[in-house]
Amino acid sequence: MQVDNLNLLKSAASRLATASVLINALYEVLNEPEIDHERVVKLMSMDIAISTRLLRLANTASNNRGVTVTSVEKAIVWLGLSEAYRVTCATITAKLCEQNLPLYRISAGRLSYNSVATAVAMELLAKEAELDPNTGYTLGLLANLGRLLLQRLADANGLPACGADLPQIAQVLAWERTHLGWNQAEAGALILRHWGLNPVFAGVIACQYDITLAGDETSRRWSALFQVAKTLVAITDYSLGVESDSCVVTDEIFQAADLPNFDGLLFSAKIAAATRELCADTGVPDPWVRTAGLVT
C-alpha cells in the first residue's frame, strides 16, 4: 500500500507545488549576495492576491508617504523587502491552507493561523539565536505541509479522523505512519526533497518533533527552536489540537536551541501580537469560526 500511497502523495503534492516552490524561489533570491530586485518584483507579481495585498498595505496611512502606490515594485520599496517577503509568503500559505482537515478535526482558519504563528515564532527565535530570520520564518510556514498531504491520502483511503482520539503527538505520528506510510514530518520532508527545494528545509522539517533525528548540528538547533516555537504558539492558543502536547521543552532542548536570554512570556506576547497583525494584513480567516464536524 505504501508504494501506491507514494504515487498518491506525489499526485496530491503537485497541487501544492506552485505555491511552495514560489516561497522557496523568493527565499533563495533574498538570500543571494546581491539581490535581483527585478526578479523579486516578478515573483511577487505572479499572483493577483499577493499583488493586491502588497498594494493595499503600501497605501495604508502608516505606510504611504503622501502619494498613491500603483505598482508592486513601489509597494516593495515602501514596505521593505523583509516585510514584503513576510506578507507574500503568509498570503501564499493562507491559500495553501484554505481547506479543512477533517482527518485531524482542524478547520482551515485554525490551520492558517497556526502556520503563521509558527512562522512568526520561528522568526523571532531565530533572531534571538542569531540565526537567519527568513529561514526561521519560512520553516514555520512549511511546518504543516505534511498534514495537507496526508489529508489527501486519508481521503483516498477513506480513513476516519484521528485527532480527537489520540491525545499525544507521539500517538498521532505513530497512527499516521501505520495508516498512511509516513507521519506528517516525514511526508513534508519527502515532498520538499521531491520538489528539489532548499535541502535545509527538508532536513529540519523531518526532525521538527525530535532533535535526535537531526543529521547535523545546524538541523539539531533548528529542530530545538521548532519545539520551543510550538510551545510558545500553544501559550498563545494558536496551537492545533493534535499538537497541544507536542513539545515539553527540556534542558536538552534549551541547550540545543542556545537561547541564553529567553523570556517565554515576553516572546509569547510578541508572537500573539505579530500573528494577529500579519493575519489581518494578509486576510487569513478567523480561526475561531466554527465549522460543522470540526473542532477549531
Image: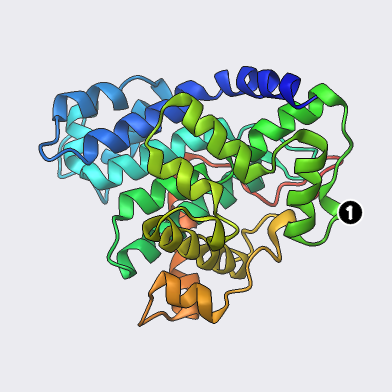
Which class describes the residues within 10 Å of circle 1: few (<14), some (14-19), or many (20+)?
few
Residue that numbered label 1 is attached to: 165
Residue at position x 23%, y 29% in the image:
40
Q: For mark 1, give the secondary structure.
A: helix
Residue at position x 29%, y 46% in the image:
83
In the figure, residue 12 lies in which quadrant?
top right
The one nearer the camera, 275 or 127, is 127
In the figure, residue 10 lies in which quadrant?
top right
Look at the image and tell me whether residue 104 can be seen. no
Q: Is residue 98 above or below residue 235?
A: above
Residue at position x 60%, y 58% in the image:
209
Q: Is residue 122 above or below residue 1?
A: below
Residue at position x 43%, y 81% in the image:
263
Furthest residue to the front?
A: 215
Q: Is residue 95 left or right of residue 282?
A: right
Residue 28 x/y as whole percent: 27, 35
Residue 246 x/y as whole percent: 67, 63
Could you tell me which quadrant the N terminus lies in?
Answer: top right
Specify the amino acid type for callout 1.
Asp
Look at the image and tell me whether residue 227 can be seen. yes
The one nearer the camera, 81 or 170, is 170
The one nearer the camera, 70 or 223, is 223
In the figure, residue 240 lies in which quadrant?
bottom right
Residue 64 x/y as whole percent: 21, 43
Q: Is residue 130 left or right of residue 223?
A: left
Residue 37 x/y as whole percent: 15, 30
